[in-house]
Image (tube, helix red, strand yellow):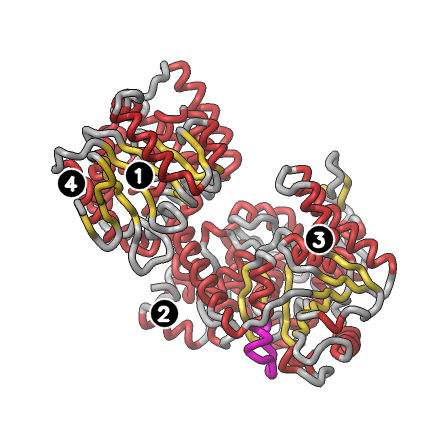
C-alpha cells in the first residue's frame, strides 16, 4: 500500500501501475470534504515521491464516483474573509494541478455520478473513461456560484468554449454518451468493464501508443481562439444566458465572464481569475440563499426517510374524482410505477381524467423523455372505474372531489366502507380541516391529508397533514407514497389552510389592501415579478380561479378572523360577483386570449376598472418598496406563526414548503430566510412602520423577543 487514509487509498496493481481509490468511510457517497481534500494532497505527494510508478488509474469504491464538494462545509467556508477563501481554493487547485502534472499518465474511471469537484478532478487527468450509466456535470450555478476547482479553466480547453458554456451556465447533468460526443470523456463502456477499460488506456499510454503529455498540454495554455472568435463566442452567449437566467441569478453570466477573462492566460493565472470571481459570488445573498436551500432540501429528504420504517408498501392506489386534478394524480402515480384506480361518478369525469393523463404522457414522448412503450405501460396502469369493485385491494385512496366539507364527508364515509380496515384514506383538500373531515369516519387513525398542488405533474410539493387522530403509520405510508411519486412531502399539523395556503392568503390580503388603496394591480404584478415571483398576485389569482380564491379566503377568514377577515368587500368579492373567474372563464383581473400555442395569454382589460372602482376606499400614494412590504410582511409573519404554532417543525420545512408550493423566489431563500437576510430586529421595525394596516402586520411576541436577543431562524 503506497498510501492509506479514511477516504483515499493508493495501491500497486501491476508493474508500476497504481490505483488511487476514493472510498470515504462512514458515508454512502464520496464527496470533497476537508478530510478527502487533505488526503488527496497526501496521496498525490506519495505518488510523486515514488519513482517506480509508471501510471495511475483513479476509481471509486462507491456506487458513484464523487458527487462534488461537501456543501455543509461550504457554508462555513463562505463566511471566511475573502483572502482566506481565495487561499483555500488555490490550495485545492495546487493539489489538482500537481495531480495533472504527474510525470506518468493518469486515467479516471467515472462510475455513477461525477458532479462539481468530482468532474473537476477528472478533468485534471489525462484520460477519462465513463460507465454507460454515468452522469457528469458542473451544477454549481444552481447554488449561486460557479466551479471553483478549475472547471472554468479546464473544461473550455478540453471541449471548446461553446460546449463548456452550455455545461457550466446550465448546470445540467449529462449522460455518458453526451459527454463522449463533446470529448469530455474518451470512452464509454458497460459498468462491469470500466476498471479494465481504465487499465487498458493507461497501459497504452505507458507503451507510448497514446501521447498523454500532448493530451494535457491544451489545459496548460491559453484558449485557442483569436479575438474575433472570442468576441463572437462570449458576447453572444452572455446575452443569451442573461436572458435565460434573469437578473436575480448572476452566476451563469459571471461564469462566462470568468472564462472570457481567463482566455488569454495559461493555467496558473487562469485559476487565479476563477478563484477571485468565485469568492465574489460566494459572498452574495443569492449564493447564501441557494446553498441554504440545498441544505434545507437535504433536511427535508432526511425527515421523509425517517418515516420509512413505519410505512406500509403501496402496491395499488386509488383516486376518487377524475378530471384535471384526479387525472394528474393518476398520471403521476402510474408514471412512477404504482398502478392506480381512477373512480368518478360520471363518464365525462373519467374521460377528462384519462385525457389529462394521456396528454401529459404524450408530451413526455414528444420530448424524448418517454418511449411509446413506456407510455402504453403507464396508461395501462391507470384503471378507470365508476364502481368500488376493486377497492378491497387498495392500499391508499386519495380523495380529490369538490372542495366542500359536506360532499367530502359523504364520499369519505362511503369509501371507508369499501376498503380494507388497514387501508389509508387521504384527502386532497387545500383548506378544510382534516380533523373536521375525520368526524365522518369510523377509523380516523387511518386518515390524513395529502394536498397536491396544481398542476400536479409540475409542482414538487405534497403537504401531508396530520389530523388529531391520525396514526404515525398513516403519515408514514402517505409520505412514502408521495416520495415514490417523485414528490417532496412536508408533514404539517392540521389548521385552516395548513402551511402553504395559510401563509399565501395574508400575501393576498396585502394585495387586497393595495387594490383598495387605488394601486393599479398591473403595477403590483410587475413589481412582485421583478421581486422574483413567477407571476404577480393578480395573475396568480386568475390562474388559481377567483371562485377558488374566494372560497379559500372565506375558510381562512373563519379560521383566523382576527387577522384574515375583511370587514369590507375586496377585489376578489367584486370579481366573483361580476362572474370574472379568471382563466377558467376567460376573464378575471385580466382577460385571456388563446395564443399560437393554444395557451391562455393575459391581456390588460380596461373594463375591469369599473368593477374594482367600488372597492377603492382610501386612495394613497405608495412606492414600489411599499408594494413589496404590503405583501411580504404579512406573508413572512404568518410563516413565523406557523413555526411558532407547531404547524411545521422547522424553519427549513416552512421555507421549502413555500418555495415548492407557491414559487417563493428561491434566490431569496424562503420567508424565514428572507427575515434573516433583513435582520430579525430590522424586520420587526419594518413591520411596525405598517402597523396601521392591521393585525396581519403585527409581529408576534416571540419574534420581538428574538429581535431583542439578536437571534435568527438559521444559525
Looking at the image, the residue that sits furthest to the front is: 14
The image quadrant of residue 265 is: top left
Whether 310 is among the magenta residues is no
Q: Which residue is mark 4?
A: 45
Q: Which residue is mark 2?
A: 707
Q: Which mark is residue 376?
A: none
Q: Earlier in the sequence, mark 4 or mark 1?
A: 4
Q: Earlier in the sequence, mark 4 or mark 2?
A: 4
Judge depth for marks 2 and 1 and give the one in front: 1
Picture residue at 36% right of the left edge, 26% below the top: 158
Q: CA distance from mark 4 to mark 2?
A: 51 Å
Q: Which residue is mark 3?
A: 542
Q: Earlier in the sequence, mark 4 or mark 3?
A: 4
Q: Which residue is mark 1?
A: 121
Picture residue at 33% right of the left edge, 52% below the top: 70
Q: Earlier in the sequence, mark 2 or mark 1?
A: 1
Q: Tell me the quarter of the image containing the C terminus.
A: bottom left
Amino acid at each position: 500500500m503506497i498510501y492509506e487514509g479514511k477516504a483515499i487509498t493508493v495501491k500497486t496493481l501491476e508493474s508500476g501501475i497504481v490505483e488511487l481509490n476514493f472510498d470515504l468511510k462512514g458515508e454512502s457517497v464520496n464527496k470533497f470534504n476537508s478530510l478527502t481534500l487533505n488526503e488527496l494532497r497526501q496521496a498525490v505527494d506519495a505518488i510523486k515521491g515514488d519513482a517506480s510508478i509508471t501510471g495511475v488509474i483513479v476509481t471509486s469504491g462507491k456506487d458513484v464516483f464523487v458527487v462534488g464538494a461537501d456543501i455543509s462545509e461550504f457554508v462555513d467556508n463562505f463566511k471566511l474573509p475573502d483572502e482566506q477563501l481565495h487561499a483555500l481554493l488555490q490550495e485545492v487547485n495546487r493539489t489538482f494541478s500537481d495531480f495533472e502534472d504527474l510525470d506518468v499518465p493518469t486515467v479516471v474511471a467515472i462510475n455513477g455520478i461525477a458532479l462539481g469537484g468530482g468532474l473537476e478532478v477528472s478533468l485534471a487527468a489525462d484520460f477519462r473513461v465513463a460507465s454507460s450509466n454515468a452522469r457528469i456535470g458542473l451544477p454549481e450555478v444552481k447554488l449561486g456560484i460557479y466551479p471553483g476547482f478549475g472547471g472554468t479553466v479546464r473544461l473550455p480547453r478540453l471541449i471548446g468554449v461553446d460546449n463548456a458554456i452550455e455545461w457550466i451556465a446550465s448546470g445540467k447533468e449529462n449522460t455518458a454518451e453526451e459527454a463522449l460526443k463533446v470529448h469530455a470523456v474518451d470512452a464509454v463502456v458497460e459498468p462491469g468493464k470500466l476498471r479494465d477499460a481504465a487499465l487498458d488506456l493507461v497501459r497504452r499510454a505507458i507503451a507510448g501508443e497514446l501521447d498523454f503529455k500532448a493530451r494535457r498540454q491544451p489545459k496548460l495554455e491559453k484558449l485557442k481562439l483569436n479575438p474575433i472568435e472570442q468576441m463572437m463566442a462570449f458576447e453572444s452567449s452572455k446575452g443569451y444566458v442573461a436572458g435565460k437566467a434573469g437578473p436575480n441569478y448572476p452566476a451563469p453570466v459571471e461564469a462566462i465572464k470568468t472564462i472570457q477573462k481567463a482566455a488569454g492566460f495559461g493555467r496558473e493565472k487562469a485559476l487565479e481569475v476563477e478563484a477571485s470571481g468565485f469568492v465574489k459570488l460566494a459572498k452574495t445573498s443569492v449564493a447564501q440563499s441557494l446553498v441554504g436551500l440545498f441544505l434545507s432540501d437535504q433536511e427535508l429528504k432526511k425527515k421523509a426517510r425517517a418515516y420509512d420504517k413505519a410505512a406500509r408498501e403501496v402496491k395499488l392506489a386509488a383516486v376518487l374524482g377524475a378530471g384535471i386534478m384526479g387525472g394528474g394524480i393518476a398520471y403521476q402515480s402510474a408514471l412512477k410505477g404504482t398502478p392506480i384506480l381512477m373512480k368518478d361518478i360520471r363518464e365525462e369525469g373519467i374521460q377528462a381524467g384519462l385525457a389529462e393523463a394521456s396528454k401529459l404522457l404524450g408530451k413526455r414522448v414528444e420530448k424524448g423523455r418517454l418511449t411509446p412503450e413506456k407510455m402504453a405501460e403507464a396508461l395501462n396502469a391507470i384503471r378507470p372505474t365508476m364502481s368500488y369493485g376493486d377497492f378491497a385491494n387498495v392500499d391508499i385512496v386519495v380523495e380529490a372531489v369538490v372542495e366542500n366539507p359536506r360532499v367530502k364527508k359523504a364520499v369519505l364515509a362511503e369509501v371507508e366502507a369499501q376498503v380494507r380496515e388497514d387501508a389509508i384514506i387521504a384527502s386532497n383538500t387545500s383548506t378544510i380541516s382534516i380533523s373536521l373531515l375525520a368526524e365522518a369516519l369510523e377509523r380516523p387513525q387511518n386518515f390524513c391529508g395529502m394536498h397536491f398542488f396544481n398542476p400536479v405533474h409540475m409542482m414538487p410539493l405534497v403537504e401531508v397533514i396530520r389530523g388529531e387522530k391520525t396514526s404515525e403509520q398513516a403519515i408514514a405510508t402517505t409520505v412514502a407514497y408521495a416520495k415514490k411519486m417523485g414528490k417532496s412531502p412536508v408533514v404539517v399539523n392540521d389548521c385552516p389552510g395548513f402551511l402553504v395556503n395559510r401563509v399565501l392568503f395574508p400575501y393576498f390580503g396585502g394585495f387586497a389592501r393595495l387594490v383598495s388603496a387605488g394601486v393599479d394591480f398591473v403595477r403590483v404584478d410587475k413589481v412582485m415579478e421583478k421581486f422574483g415571483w413567477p407571476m404577480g398576485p393578480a395573475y396568480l389569482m386568475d390562474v388559481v380561479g377567483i371562485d377558488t380564491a374566494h372560497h379559500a379566503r372565506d375558510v381562512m377568514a373563519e379560521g383566523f378572523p382576527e387577522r384574515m377577515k375583511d370587514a369590507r368587500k375586496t377585489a376578489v368579492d367584486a370579481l366573483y360577483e361580476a362572474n370574472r373567474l379568471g382563466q377558467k372563464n376567460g376573464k378575471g383581473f385580466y382577460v385571456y386570449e388563446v395564443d399560437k400555442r393554444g395557451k391562455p395569454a393575459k391581456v390588460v382589460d380596461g373594463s375591469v376598472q369599473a368593477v374594482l372602482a367600488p372597492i377603492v376606499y382610501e386612495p394613497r400614494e405608495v412606492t414600489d418598496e411599499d408594494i413589496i412590504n404590503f405583501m411580504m410582511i404579512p406573508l413572512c409573519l404568518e410563516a413565523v406563526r406557523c413555526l411558532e404554532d407547531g404547524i411545521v417543525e422547522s424553519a427549513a420545512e416552512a421555507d421549502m414548503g413555500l418555495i415548492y408550493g407557491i414559487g417563493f423566489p428561491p434566490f431569496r431563500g424562503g420567508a424565514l430566510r428572507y427575515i434573516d437576510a433583513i435582520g430579525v430586529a430590522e424586520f420587526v421595525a419594518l413591520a411596525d412602520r405598517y402597523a396601521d394596516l392591521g393585525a396581519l402586520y403585527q409581529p408576534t411576541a416571540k419574534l420581538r423577543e428574538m429581535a431583542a436577543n439578536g437571534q435568527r431562524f438559521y444559525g
